[in-house]
Each structure stands twice: as structure tokens, then as C-alpha cells.
Amino acid sequence: MIRGITFDIDAPVFSATAGASIAGAIDLERTNFGAQWQALVYPGVTLGLNRVTTSLYNGNGVTGLPTLTYNPTTGTTTVTLFFNAAAAAGAATTNSFTEFNSLADGNYTLGLANANLNLLFGGSGSSTVSAATVPFYRAFGDMNGSALPIPVNGADLFFLSDATSNAGSAYRTFLDFDNDGTVVTATPGTSPDVQAFNRRFNRNFVA
């Protein structure tokens, strides 16, 4: 699950326009995996593409904003995107970027839109930022960071087995697909978490 993303910027950060949120400077973009993955994992659903909607963020209880914390000792600004706004809850539907307060499966890049951000360095007068991006992917069930094209594989079964049989498992949060606080039900075969895992298990995400 990816219910939040945190990154540090080595400077005090302010929005370029007074009163504007830093959300406008965050460029989180999504693309799909392959057609086989789409047909098997999200049949009939066309997920959102390109820039993730900022209304899905919810920082400090404010919809549309990330959390923003400046540390005067280190001079760094920590930015956290939580996907726990009301708009991010529930199952994925057409044009969704999220499901159950997590990013949906897909390839992502995270960067800063330099036209919307000022980095202010004391005494330097600098107000520019590079547009570097960081790629990552989200594939529910991939517990050990296996490489594509088959990220959810036999190595992940151990984690699922532990999560469904051990009430104190450290993996329960990561495998709680529908964010209901549990991984197993009275009938494990009907568990949305297990079903979501099985849809992805040994699937080629690139083909």
C-alpha cells in the first residue's frame, strides 16, 4: 500500500504565488502497466493517467494540501502527501488514481514543477529549482520489491500467509487492501485482501 509519500527538500520552501498551496508545485504522475495486467486486475476500469489530482491529498486534515514541515536546524523542508481525503477512499473507478486511500497500481514519477515553486536560500536570492523526477511503481502484494514484469510472485506468499494467520503480523497493514483493519475474514477465500493478491499473483505486469 502507498497511503503516503514523504520527501525532503534541502531548503525552506514557499509556493510561488502568495496563498497558493505547495500542492501545485508537486508533480506526481501515473501511467498504466501492460494490457494483460489491466484486463486481469482492473477489468472494465480505466484508471486515471498523468498528473494525480491534488484533491486526493489531505495534510493535517485539510483536503488538497500535503503536510509541510520546515526544520530550522537542518534547513530542510519535509513534504508528506497523505492519500486519506474522502475522495481517495473506496474502490477504484474510472479515472481513479487511488483505491482505499492508497495509490492504485501503476508506474509513477514524483517531481517538482519549477514554475510553481520557490526555494528561498537565505542571502542568496535564489528562486529556482530543478525539475528532476523520481520513478517508482505500486503493485499491491509486492512485499519485497521484486522487479517487473512479475512483481507479485512466490516470494510474496510467505508474507500473505503470515498476515492471514498471525494476528500480530507486521505485514497486516501492507496487505490490508481495502483498509478495513484486517486481512483475513471468517472465510479467507472471500477476503478482499486475498482476492486482490490472487488477481496479481504471477501475472505479467508488462505484457
Image (tube, helix red, strand yellow):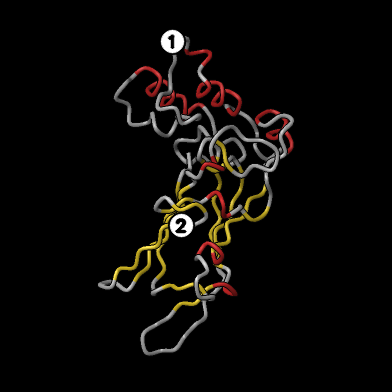
- Vertical arrangement, residue 142 with respect to residue 61, above or below: above
Q: Is residue 50 left or right of residue 81?
A: right
Considering every residue shown, the one lying at the far top of the view is: 187
Disc 2: CA contacts within 10 A as few (<14), some (14-19) or many (>=20): many
Q: Quadrant of the C terminus?
A: top right
Disc 1: which residue: 186
Q: Is residue 180 left or right of residue 71?
A: right
Residue 124 position in % (x across, y down): 41, 89
Residue at the (63%, 30%) spot, across then down: 203
Considering every residue shown, the one lying at the far left of the view is: 73
Q: Is residue 80 left or right of residue 99?
A: left
- Vertical arrangement, residue 190 with respect to residue 105, above or below: above
Q: Tag 1's secondary structure?
A: loop
The disc placed on residue 66 is 2
* Amino acid type, residue under disc 2 in the picture: Pro
Residue 77 position in % (x across, y down): 37, 67
Closest to the observer, 170 or 99: 99
Q: Tag 2's secondary structure?
A: loop
* CB within 8 Å, label 2 to label 1: no
